[in-house]
Amino acid sequence: MPETKVVRLGVCGCGMIAEHHLAAMKLWESPVIVTVAIDPSEARRNIVSELTGAQAYATLEEALAEAADSMDAIALMLPHDLHAAYSLKVLAAGKHLFLEKPVARDAEESQQIFDAAAAAFKATGSRFFMAENSSFWPEVYRAKQLVQEGAIGEVVTARSHYYESMDDTPMNPDKDSKTKGNVEGSNSSGSGGGDGADVGGGNGDGDGDGNAALEEGSDDSESSESARYERADTGWLSWRSSLERSGGGVVLDGGQHWIRPLREFFGEEVKSVVATTGRPMKVLEGESLAHAILEFDSGRHASFQATVLGKSSAMSTREPCFRVIGTTGEIVVVGGFGAGGYIMRTGGIEEPLLPEGAPGGFLTSFGPQMNDFANAILQDKPFYRAPEYAMGDMLVAKAIAKSASSRAWVDVWDAKTEHFKQTF
């Protein structure tokens, strides 16, 4: 890879999640420039192109054929069933890979990606980054620091609750994209960027999480894979409603952002889970409601809840995102997508979780996450979290679904996945 002062990024999938990344890249002055925009929707790719000056292409194949020299890395922001196939294409092209969570739909597809990433790194030095931004969520990052400092004594238990109202009506992405209005002028020439683990600085705004509703254009073959790439004029439900395409329900999707922090707080892996799930949002084949107890390697327990309802629902943001209870205090991250929080110490002393004026909230985390990726490439720094770490999030989600089906405790790890377990 040639040495550069910025990372030239191709964005494959120009939907909602790309919107958040573009905004964060501007706000955090990331050392990244978007040079290529890829999406089968002409409207979506042209919006990103207009905002960033990127070359626009309908397919990854076209972009690699015509603009490979313009990209150091490619960010895949795609439906889950495309992760494995597209990751292998990016790595085979010798590009650094930035992959939005989850790794894939299951352990088998995930192993394909890790095997290809290992071979690519050996052959070309290409880096593989798994994007789970909740590790960089300012409140989560600070809470983890406080736990490690012993600010609340020993962690006894914790609770997380992912809740969101989602539009449950189809939309036309060519007409209803909100990208341009939210990230106007978002491209940065990349001065500075800081260390990926530093979550201070910048600010964020937005309206929630969600991957692009992108179904990649046909590659002229007659394969079933090609058929999945054909575009459908529907919104986020176009693929999330399908259990086969998504690989799961809301736990494997947005819920992973609430599973990762529990692992961060406890500083160990989840050993087993017991769970129940439901489908109050009938348009989804997978679950839209989940209650789970997570047992960690130490024998301690945490609870996880996911509640996703249609746009007509009214859920209060007073419900905390996270509560971490220790022997001498507790830490609370406020509701919604978590902008603020406090630590309660012995004697009822309450202190803000973040300093006054410090950036906070879920959406601000996309900035330091992108910087972590860029600094690994530009400065040969280790990632804040190894890509293997993301397997724990995915496997917990899969175990929750299995437990709900079997109505029994389910182990998270088995002989085929044990090698992914992380040492904290």
Image (cartoon, grey):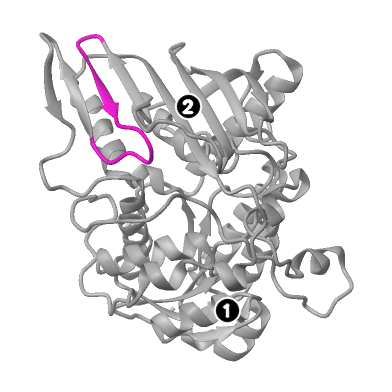
Q: Position of residue 209 (x, y in %)?
A: 47, 50
Measure how far apart labels 2 and 1 are at the Cα level.
Answer: 43 Å
Give the residue at the far bottom of this rendering: 66
Q: Is residue 129 magenta?
A: no
Q: Residue at x 75, y 39 (%)?
A: 285
Q: Is residue 339 magenta?
A: yes
State whether residue 309 is above or below residue 63: above
| Residue hosting label 1 | 43
Q: Residue at x 56, y 20 (%)?
A: 292
Q: What amino acid is at disc 1?
A: Ala
Magenta residues, as a range?
327-340
| Residue hosting label 2 | 269
Q: Main secondary structure of the magenta part?
A: loop
Q: Residue at x 43, y 14 (%)?
A: 298
Q: Position of residue 4 (x, y in %)?
A: 33, 80
Quadrant, the N terminus: bottom left
When asked about the image quadrant of residue 291, the answer is top right
Q: What amino acid is at disc 2?
A: Glu
